[in-house]
Image (spheres, coloured by chain):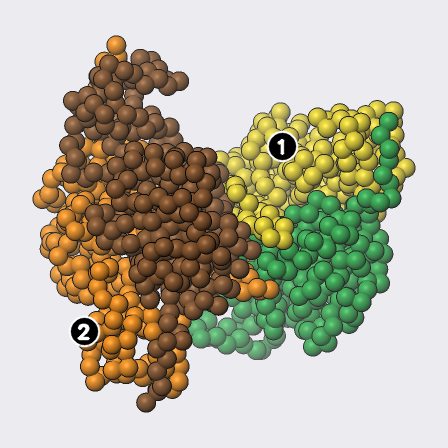
Chain colours: A yellow, B green, C orange, D brown
Amino acid sequence: MNDLASQIIAEGDLVLLSLSQRKTYLVRVEQSKSFHTHKGFVRFDDLIGKDFGCTVLSSLGCEFTALKPLLRDFIMKSARQTQIMYPKDIALIVMFSGIGPGSRVVEAGTGTGAMTTALAHYVRPNGRVYSYEIREEFQKTAMKNLERAGLADFAELKNKDVTVGIDEKDIDAVILDLAVPWLVIPHALAALKSSGMLVSFSPTIDQVVRTVETLKENSFTDIETVECLMRGMQVERGRTRPQTLMTAHSGYITTARKALKNIALISPP
Amino acid sequence: MNDLASQIIAEGDLVLLSLSQRKTYLVRVEQSKSFHTHKGFVRFDDLIGKDFGCTVLSSLGCEFTALKPLLRDFIMKSARQTQIMYPKDIALIVMFSGIGPGSRVVEAGTGTGAMTTALAHYVRPNGRVYSYEIREEFQKTAMKNLERAGLADFAELKNKDVTVGIDEKDIDAVILDLAVPWLVIPHALAALKSSGMLVSFSPTIDQVVRTVETLKENSFTDIETVECLMRGMQVERGRTRPQTLMTAHSGYITTARKALKNIALISPP
Amino acid sequence: MNDLASQIIAEGDLVLLSLSQRKTYLVRVEQSKSFHTHKGFVRFDDLIGKDFGCTVLSSLGCEFTALKPLLRDFIMKSARQTQIMYPKDIALIVMFSGIGPGSRVVEAGTGTGAMTTALAHYVRPNGRVYSYEIREEFQKTAMKNLERAGLADFAELKNKDVTVGIDEKDIDAVILDLAVPWLVIPHALAALKSSGMLVSFSPTIDQVVRTVETLKENSFTDIETVECLMRGMQVERGRTRPQTLMTAHSGYITTARKALKNIALISPP
Amino acid sequence: MNDLASQIIAEGDLVLLSLSQRKTYLVRVEQSKSFHTHKGFVRFDDLIGKDFGCTVLSSLGCEFTALKPLLRDFIMKSARQTQIMYPKDIALIVMFSGIGPGSRVVEAGTGTGAMTTALAHYVRPNGRVYSYEIREEFQKTAMKNLERAGLADFAELKNKDVTVGIDEKDIDAVILDLAVPWLVIPHALAALKSSGMLVSFSPTIDQVVRTVETLKENSFTDIETVECLMRGMQVERGRTRPQTLMTAHSGYITTARKALKNIALISPP
């Protein structure tokens, strides 16, 4: 994700070997070694010194394209110990949160770091992600995923229970993806700048209802909940049609902004 | 969108006056002046010196919250001379394009600058957006929208016909939102880094088919088309339900990566 | 809906005057009279003696096609004092209920009779619909709608509170479209044949949850809830695309079958 | 589907053995025999003489409910040599076609008879389905499926090529589910009553475009295309949410009515 990096594949580089968009492998190039698939093996020495985007043949004669991995690839390749968020949901959460370069963001829980990776990517170079997680084994996976994506410098992984409190202040956005978001809302209120954004992702409607109720009780405003359905298309002249199967549901996204209802109420003229 | 900016509302600041999430106004604060709505007027002097997030009463006693505008607000408030892209589509396009701080992006057409604003926001501080538009009047609106969002330094608006050619080289991503994307694909191929990403947004299936065909003919790989449906939820204990109406279609998003099929084909061992 | 009826338009016939599929009028043909629209008036005498399907010009020269009204038209033209069910939902409810010619069906509430009309249509000639409604004014509208569709003989409109009880026994299916379906479930259990089908339509998730819980407590089995989204397509070579707006939600459809769990439990061999 | 039939399970009856709504078996009861599943076997003698809706235990102690099969079950259990239509699509097609008891319907192609079964069910007792199919092996399967559902008397399976012509006249509705619907449209025009309904089901957009174009050229009016998405809900207090996976696409439904544009054009007053 270092956009200034060389376009030449070198020893130690991460490469997305793509057989098709449905079958890709995120691998690190090592001299004299090979990568084995059910479609034959690819020699890394065939890649080194070539441009990203080049196509090589495997030992069984199958074409693999050696792509430079992008954010979406890192998200999709985050270890799936937990149910990770889909890029579509992460994309909307990032957009709705308003964050960008320089933003300071609190996230909980870290999980395997898919969301953390995206947040770290966008707050570079001078922003920071503070990510809370109580399960240590997830934290280790998340750290590996962040390092692989070259983004470890922009995130601080904290092995703390976010339902007890948030250490940071003057935060631009709080992103919640945990089973009990409502327990974190009062802490989010304290941590956020006024007018700051809270975004919560929850699979069930019951979680959404409780979250929205707690947001209303905690001086949040502009509360909104949406879900996003993404459907693939099979595009081929004469046979174009939507795909047969799709993910019907991942989760609901709830957004809200911190208001100062009790402080600055001004009498009308 | 300057995340380090003061949290205190000052003369000249942009404020999102929010009556509800469905009714918001993006206004610039001017001393001794007022903003008039069908729910009464709000005196800017009541806001100056207060924190963003404060709530004021209008002359008719209605509550307005004075929020700090975020990227999504700038997108939604881009002048609607053209059909603008929705934040949901912009969010997916940004994510799928792989861009972030430091990226160099080509966009065409500029339109009223909704997409340009988002791209400029994310490529800060050292990246750049090159945005092509042949209709001068749109360009002016786009420039105003970029300036309002404080992002004019990160985008170069070019009054040129992108179907004739792209001036830039070694571009990370090309974003197309125009009637004839297929005419731009050969130029995008020349402008992109190898392994670089092209994203095209089109309302009709016919445009998508022609775009995909041209991508295949031009050495692009991992070609994929999706559409995104976003549905709002009305959340209230005892009455929770999806919204009654939704946008059924804005456009299809097609993504593809530049491969070097003819250059680096390596014979198998 | 009398399929054996003449194809010649006669005095007293119902005709669906169609300007386009978005603009249609359900009118009764009366000699020497006219039907007035914003596109001019149509003389009924121009229609009498012609075939259904003929096209006439209005006084302003606009083309109207005189179609024979079908079930869907009668449903769409049911007076909209209440929120009527959409044909898509009625279609699924009819299919899932398993009813057909000869079925005996209980419905509640009648509302303006859109669902009643559909049920009566399908249970002809020897089945019967028993429809409960406490609001007398709705019942009158429903009766008019049934009579207009020529289906009054197949439905019995009952001005009774279905939450107090259902008079009928050995019913094939019970169709519920009311605010408190769970109050009717024990009565439905008593009214249904064993293995009979209950279908409930509710706009909110809270209603669905309570309905499903009550079904489980009342010896129903194969309980399933779905929602149906219908999206129109604008079909035109070179510009084909989904419609811009759609109904995002009408209601959830819950189906269940009456089991005899406590009666016929047989010990394994 | 004989609604007047006994509610007592007898030798020779079809029973839907339901382990859950996701796992059901359509079996014929035979004295002294058993039905074997991965959850143990069920003795038919345990069912005979009991009411439909009774619950029995398998040899492994699993509960099976013996339901009376309904139309939807017969559709779902139609042999899957071809891609069958889903009940949701059949439901909409039946509704949009306007057919009911007494209707005379032409269908092509028959396939394995899922749609034929539904049509025969609804046109009883005095209507008739004329179903065209060129592949003899499908016709045999369709006949078995119709017989199993007790509906063979209401459908005439014709081993003829519908693209050559339709034998029938004064048909209420023509239902098309074949690869080249446009070839049948002129024949449908000849076969239909004026104002009669044509409904075509096609998986690809290209088929839809060509169908709509041919309908326009052939004096059809009120042409409309829709698609239907059905999503299941997992309903359980505290964990309610949409299902994770869904069918993203089965096909588009196009409807049109036969107009007499060239015949009855009447000069305005």
Report which residue position mark 2 lands on. C12
Q: For the residue labelled by badge 1, is the local secondary structure a helix, a strand or a loop?
A: loop
* Residue drawn 43% across the image and 35% down it: D137
C29 on left or right of D156: left
Determine whether D130 is above or below C114 in the image: above
In the picture, the quarter occupied by the C terminus of chain D is: bottom left
**Image quarter for residue B189?**
bottom right
Dot 2 crowding, Cα within 10 Å, few <14, some 14–19, many 20+: few
- Considering every residue shown, the one lying at the far bottom of the view is D269
Report which residue position mark 1 lands on. A112
- Considering every residue shown, the one lying at the far right of the view is A49
* Residue drawn 40% across the image and 74% down it: D261
Between D129 and D96, the one nearer to me in the picture: D129
In the picture, the quarter occupied by the N terminus of chain D is: top left
* Residue drawn 77% across the image and 39% down it: A65
D252 on left or right of C26: right
Residue D52 on image: x %, y %:
20, 29
Between C151 and A253, the one nearer to me in the picture: C151
For badge 1, the amino acid type reads Thr
